[in-house]
Image (cartoon, rainbow, N blue to C red):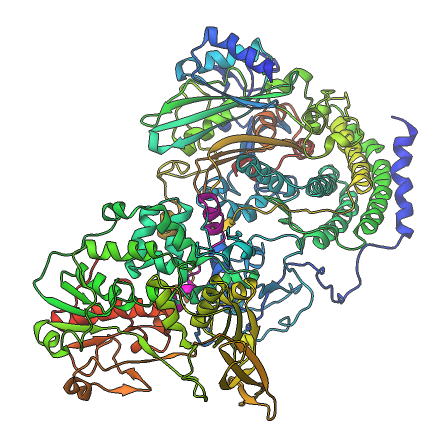
Amino acid sequence: MNIIEDKFSVWQKRFSLSGFENKSSELAFVQVPADQTVAFITTVRDLDGYKHLVFFTAVDLLEDGVFRLTYMLHNYTTKHDLGIQTDISRDSASMESIHHLWPHGATYQRELKEMFGIDFPGSPGVNESFVLEGWFAMPPMRRDFDTKEYSEATFFPRPGRKTFDTQEYMKEQLYPSEAETW
Amino acid sequence: MSLKDIIAPFSVWKRAFEKPYTTKKPLDERPGAARYRGFHINDMNKCIGCGTCEEICQNAAIDLVPVSKTVHGDSGLRPKIDYGRCCWCALCVDICPTSSLGMSNEYIWIDSDPEVFRFIPGHDDKPWNNSELGYRRAEGYDLLEGQRVAMPMLSFEESKKSFVEMVQGYSAEQARLEADRCIACGICVATCPAHMQVPEYIKAIRDDDMGEGLKIVYNANPLPASCGRVCSHACEYVCAVKHKGEALSIRWLKRYIIDQIYLGDYQKVLDEGEPGNGKKIAVIGSGPGGLSAAYYLSLLGYAVTIYDANDKAGGMLRYGIPEYRLPYNQIDKDVDYITSLGVEIIQNTKIGRDIPFSKIYDEFDSVFFSTGLTDPYGLDISGEDLKGVIPGLEMLDEVTKGLVPDIGSSVVVVGGGNVAMDAARTSKRYGAEVTILYRRRKEDMPADEEEIEEAQGEDCILTTQAIPLRLEKGDKTRLKLYWGKAEMVSEGPGKRPKPVLIEGSEELIECDTVITAIGQAADYSFLSEEITAKLSFKRGYVEVNEFYQTADRKIFAGGDIANPKRDAISAIANGHSAAKGIDIYLTNFRKLN
Amino acid sequence: MVDAKKQDPRSKFPPVEGGKSRYNLTSGKYMKIWQGPQHPGITGNMSLELTVCGDEVVDCKTHVGYLHRGFEKLMERRKYIQCFPLVCRICVPEPDFNEYLFAECVEELAGIQIPERAKWLRALTLEMARLTSFLMWIGGQAGSFGMGTIGQWTVTMRDYMLDLFEELSGGRIYHMYIIPGGVRADLPEGYEGRVESTLKQIEKVLKDVELALMHNYVFKKRAKGLGIITPDMVDEYGITGPNARGSGVKRDIRKDNPYLIYDQLDFEIVTETGSDAYARTWVRMKEMYQSIDLIRQMMKKMPKEGPFFQKLPNVLHWKVPAGQTYHKSECTRGEYGFYMVSDGTELPRRVYVRGPSYTHAVTLMERLAVNTNIADTAGLMVSLHTYPPEIER
């Protein structure tokens, strides 16, 4: 537990880390400003043994107008996972690429471009479609993409289905005209 | 390359002589495992159509469709499953509060018509309907909680000594836990006479939003502090969760909301109502019916005057229910909010005695009376007029007024309703030995289950199937009550069995006081003869239409006098309906938001 | 991607421009071939866009998306309990890892402790799922080199495992057994005996598979030297599981970050040093024996009775406290993980599924396919043990 806290104080001397969440002896999250993120990742990869990029993904915090990027790194020596998080603006979202650190970073970035619309200039093939060939609507993992609305517009429901609300139905059956809550 | 690498693969030729894995055609039946999640089964008699299966289904595979007759506690709807969507996860089985839903181990069914794969399990005839095998919720695994959060209560030892409120109320933590048990099916709403939005106010507790809760409660019930304590809670008898054990404490959760908000803060939360429209309404009787009508009428902009014969408002809530069940300050809380809206209550004024009915009839735009049942029935046995025989209501009334009732040291209460229980327990608090005599069996008693339990807990002796025969003057005590044993005689299926005296049986109880609590009748003497002639009556009740309007269009009536359900919440509902009726009668119906 | 520096100088390879090879398909020298999405030599619904020169692959591009059902998005629109029947579908051969990780994440965020017996039952199903998944994989590995019979044996064994799952959970493929709070049912009567007899049968077949496959000249000839993953590639490409262990990298989450009750079991991490498809096959073969052993250990060490489920708050309106967490486990293909973010409402804010195939089937496959023979791509791909739905979730 303490090892990672010591590490954190070391990192803090070089980077303006804005948050630190020590979940367990195996997992911690650290918040880094966007412009220092790739430098920070490079540091922890090369100096602190976080050599394994476990995953890289985004969370759409629509209410705050940001995407929260999470780079999960793993240190095989200390058996510790470090989630490096940074918030970037949702409008014309763009982030520095990490494909030079891990080749599969490019795959993650390609997916993030497609699913969230986050651009990673310079990342190989970032504009190529990954999962959604021929998709032109809003990047579907964004919170404001309404899957239900999309599915209702795209598909048709099976005809002949009708359901009754228990409370409403009992009202119709048992006390249709009685005054209750008005 | 070693020789082994050439030979080794050939060595497995030996498998050619082993029993093959394949099965001979035609395939024998291969039944699914005992826990197999196959086509659903549903016990039509157990299912109550609560719709929880539909709620939890993440595939929207379940529709609720009308199948059987709607009755209280059973919507009559049954789940219809679209197997084009069902993913066989069986969460619907796990969550089913009645455990009516299960799954068979049947999985093979081929048909070229896709429509057949949408059916009502248990209702539509399927070969697996009586399947013993198949998935059921396992013992030791449950998604719902069947046990109530225990209510902190005074012990019987303590409670029988004083008039301190026995039920102490939930803490925030307890209330949230209890509210969390609700499955929000809404089955209780139909059964509540006032159709309170129970799932919504319970949700407000879960969300810790007391203001919202108060608003929802006041939408249908302006006497929640009282009702949260003494309501007959018909809702709890039909609660879907009751099928898992204990019903939700709906009544006490309502009380929890009210207990959290000071009277002074009500105004910040509740709607003010419409501006005055200049019309005047008279309400006779300040019981739950009258107060409810007054509240909703005043929200609609009417000037309401309540005439009440007693010293304080509340009617039977105050004078018929002992303080340990309903503290007077709680009635005050309800009444004070209603008066704060501008409703005028004129106390100690009995219509027909102090003011003639005709005067009110002429002065006001409309009249609502909810005077209740005030004339106690007699026992109809000899010796009834001896000293020491008093009606239960009279005794409770005296206690409320602060008088010490003259009951001596031993009391027999005759009756099995709430008044009987209240009289018995009140007598206990004055130090008397109490015996309750009831004609029928314990399960026939009209009193609330809790009241019977608590009366017995406080050491009141309950003697059932006992019919009073005659009263005589006692030797050591004031009275001697002779009673006979009754046997229950069936009156045919579906009917309540009748108690019939066993000839020759006779028992004696010596006591100082006999309290009669076998019901009351209405007193219509306050009405003028001319009005009485206009109204129609049936079995002692004044006849009204669905808006609680009597045969005289200007007169509305509700509560016990017009409603055989005879409880506070029905009276409140009547008052509400009458307010709507009066509004329609006087203007045109407008929606109050 | 073809790395310019590592480019073979032979002239038949396409010219490099700006670090990228450029083919002149009209030259007649190169040809594009699609392997998949419907192809016996492809795992699941995925396809490889191969550029070949003769029968040698000069470029490979992985295409996914044929199975995209948007699970991660769907979960954002469902209550926590409603996600439970969804998650298992992310991986057909071993759905239990999804169920376990989802449950583990929710339990951590909601602060729920599950009973001891539930942990053992969970570990038991996970290990059974590993064995089941490996049994199916052998079929692919042998089949891709033309030895379909071996696959028939093992897939039958897999079916016997599915019978066990059916008996335990009520479902053969999607078990939906591990639910937040514990598991849904206890072991059936006499289950232990039936597990043991199935394991014995599997052991016997595995011995035959060893003879017919691992000691098979044809298989050795083709699998040895195929798809070499050097140890330094392991971190670079984020390689986990048997693919890393086949290169002598001794890593196993069950041992390194033990979850459930794995710290109470006795086992060693299996490694091989061959770094090629053959070595990876050996790792998996040995891990099957290991799984059989672990299942037996668990059956022995498991507490014989006790609760298997911890009551949850009412799941119909369960608000999981805000927070985030990541949990991982060792599935047959490597590190399987769930990253979950809750915003304190009834619906999860974000659930991210980390499948090992994400790197194995895309970046790594694109790299390893180059210079292989077209006939070996199927074998190579199966030797990476990839599974598309965890790529596109």
Q: What residue do we see at 69% from left, 22% from top? A: C228
Q: Outermost residue, top direction?
A: A13
Give the dominant element type of the magenta stretch: helix, strand or loop: helix
Residue A138 versus residue B231 in the image, above or below: above
Q: What residue do we see at 35% from left, 37% from top? A: A138
Picture quadrant of residue C368: top right
The answer to which of B191 and B27 lies nearer the viewer is B191
Question: Does the magenta-highlighted stretch encompass residue B174?
Answer: yes
Q: Is residue B533 in view from this perspective? A: yes
In the rendered structure, the answer to whether residue C214 lies left or right of residue C350 reads right
Q: Quadrant of the N terminus of chain B?
A: top right
Picture quadrant of residue C287: top right
Q: Outermost residue, bottom direction?
A: B503
Q: What residue do we see at 39% from left, 45% from top? A: B207
Q: Is residue A169 in view from this perspective? A: no
Picture coordinates of residue C202 (x, y %)? 82, 44
Q: Outermost residue, front direction?
A: B475
Q: What residue do we see at 40% from left, 50% from top? A: B256
The answer to which of B373 and C45 lies nearer the viewer is B373
Residue C180 versus residue B183 in the image, above or below: above
Picture coordinates of residue C214 (x, y %)? 82, 33
Q: Quadrant of the C terminus of chain B?
A: bottom left
Picture coordinates of residue B252 (x, y %)? 43, 55
In the rendered structure, the answer to whether residue B334 lies left or right of residue B147 reads left
Magenta residues (range): B171-191
Picture coordinates of residue C241 (x, y %)? 68, 28
Picture quadrant of residue B297: bottom left
Residue B483 versus residue C221 in the image, above or below: below
Question: Does the magenta-highlighted stretch encompass residue C96?
Answer: no
